[in-house]
Image: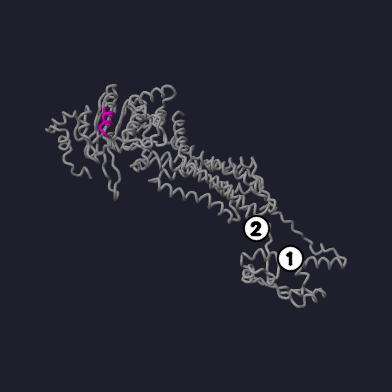
Amino acid sequence: MIKVTNLHKSFLGAKKQPVIALNGLSFTAKDGEITGILGPNGAGKTTCLRTLYGLLKADSGSAIIDGISVSASPIEARAKLGIFPDKFGLYERLTAYEQIDYFASIHGLTGQAKHTAIEAIIKDLDMEVLAYRKTQGFSQGQRMKVTLAQALVHQPQNFVLDEPTRGLDVMSTRVLRDHLARFKDKGHCILFSSHVMQEVAALCDRVIIVANGKLAAEGTPTELCELAGEKLLEDAFVKLIGSDEGVAA
Amino acid sequence: MIQFKALLIKEFKEAFRDKRALMVAMTMAMLAPVMILVLSKTMIKEMVATPPIYLQVTGENFAPKLFKQLQQNNINSLTDAPEDMKDLWKERNVELIIPENFAKSMMEGRAITLTLRADFSEKALNAPIRRIKNQINSYAQSIGAKRLIVRGMDPRLLRPIKINDQDTAQPSSNAMFISLMLGLYVLMAAFMSGLSVAIDSSAGERERNVLEMLLCQPVSTFKIVVAKLCCASTISIIGVTLTLVLTSFSVGFVDLTKIGATFNLDVSMVLFLIILLLPISFFASALQLFVSFQAKSFKEAQSTVSMIIMLPAMIPVALMFIDDKPQWLDWLPVSGQSLLMDDLFKGIAINWAAFAATALVTIGLTTLLVIILSLRLKSEKVVLALS
């Protein structure tokens, strides 16, 4: 379970003017659910997720993962997380297997347990053919699979994805979606940010709409549509964040 | 420990699979022995030969015996010069004037003044002038000694004090030159060999977007930095070792005894140098990681790191110009090792206290760099620079 309470974060922008990225954001992502974060560009999604990883320190407020405060003990909190980052690069001189192995070891897996975990995730994602090839020259979809495998190899209780479907074709998006659904059924907590309305509508149990660094609305996709009095989630989204004025900047 | 092992294995895999970067790092080591071989061969050739000198002599008939001695030592009259040398020596314009009354004064035992005219500030003339003077002096001395002996006196009476020169710059300044080159070269190798790995594993990973992923993992930045440092400095140590081993082979092909010099690089010396340079390899890699982790791009890292390489090249050269070296130079990294290498090559006993001091200071500074770097990797600035 991921619980974010009243997060504030501002940066010094151009001419030393503070830019407010998060302005009292609060939400909870529960176990056994897929929670989607929707928001226009610059709404603070990535900042929020980076605060969750412990890469950024919030000015005030707290992020708690399975009862562990990220700011107080970032390493323990990260151990509970599987991360699919904003930009996913691969170690191009390693094979896919070695790369997954690397992340499994960082999460403390060893010996037979590690081997079984890696084999399982490779089979799960249907990437046996890729496993022993160096990742240089992998397609976007193949890269996504490797990144997904390395994030999930230790079976984290919580799984955070930052715009995972960017640049993926339909087939790869489906693989990802299937996997997330199965992961949810096992009782894990999934939090993912996206721009793509259909995807959020199809996949998420609950949606959090973020605008101007704070919560604009929260609920199931249907609830949100009702709340805004619109049929499509996209229209509801635009209505709920107000206009896009001053947000896209 | 599991984490550190995984980090280390991954760094080594990446470093050793980057064949091209590794090749570049090792060419540095391969070139050293070749360079030293060629340089010392040409130098020996120059040293052993006494090239002919052609000077303009006025009144050579007045002192035929003196002139004969000069000729025996390849110091000739300009009129005898072959065509191709004539112009050169005409331009150099070295002139020896023998007075008309040479023979008469010699008979009467009066002092004779010879005049040697030349541009004494011209470097190319240093050696010829020295040779001419030496020959004339030795001729004069032998006549003087004979005069005393004829009068029943011991010529040694004229020299109540004799200076016994013991040159600590031994065995000869030329072997010194070789060792200076080698010292400089191994220091450079320590800095150069690990360079590409250091940049690639820091600025390179940032540019390939894998650094953010790593920083999100439940692993301390200290472990990350130490793993990267171990890898880069191992490559650096391999570079240094290769340079030394190959050089010790190639020095065997040069006959330094021809110039009265001995320079050998035996196993114990190679081992000593490797141990001496071990901390420097770590220090160099730490410095390179420190700089390139803060650079915004691979390119920026490369240009900043190449400044660091100036360090091992500049410091030993600068040290040569300091006559009265302050004590603390013995302790600092690079300068301390450089001075110790000088001592070793000169055959002076190693000052173990200085050895320990410089090693400790170097290791201390390396640790400090690692700690600061791992703290910096936790800071938001580095994270914000990721995207």
Residue at image mark 1: B135
Rounded to the nearest angstrom, the CA distance separating label 1 from label 2 is 20 Å
| Range of residues picked out in magenta | A169-177
Q: Is residue A173 magenta?
A: yes
Which mark, residue B373? Answer: none
Determine which residue is flagged by label 2. Answer: B46
In the image, is B126 to the left or to the right of B190? right
Viewer-closest of B75 and B243: B75
Q: Which of pointers 1 and 2 indicates the residue nearer the eye? A: 2
Callout 1: SS: helix
Looking at the image, the residue that sits furthest to the right is B152
Q: Quadrant of residue A224?
A: top left
- Chain bearing tag 1 is B
- Chain at numbered mark 2: B
In the structure shown, which secondary structural element does the residue marked by tag 2 occupy?
Answer: helix
Image x and y of residue B310, in percent: 50, 51
Please say if the residues under marks 1 and 2 sit with CB atoms less than 8 Å apart. Answer: no
Three-letter code for the amino acid on which mark 1 is drawn: Gln
- What coloring was used for the rendering? one colour
The location of residue B157, given as percent across then percent down, is 82, 63
Quick check: can you spot residue B288? yes
The image position of residue B284, as x and y in percent, is: 50, 44
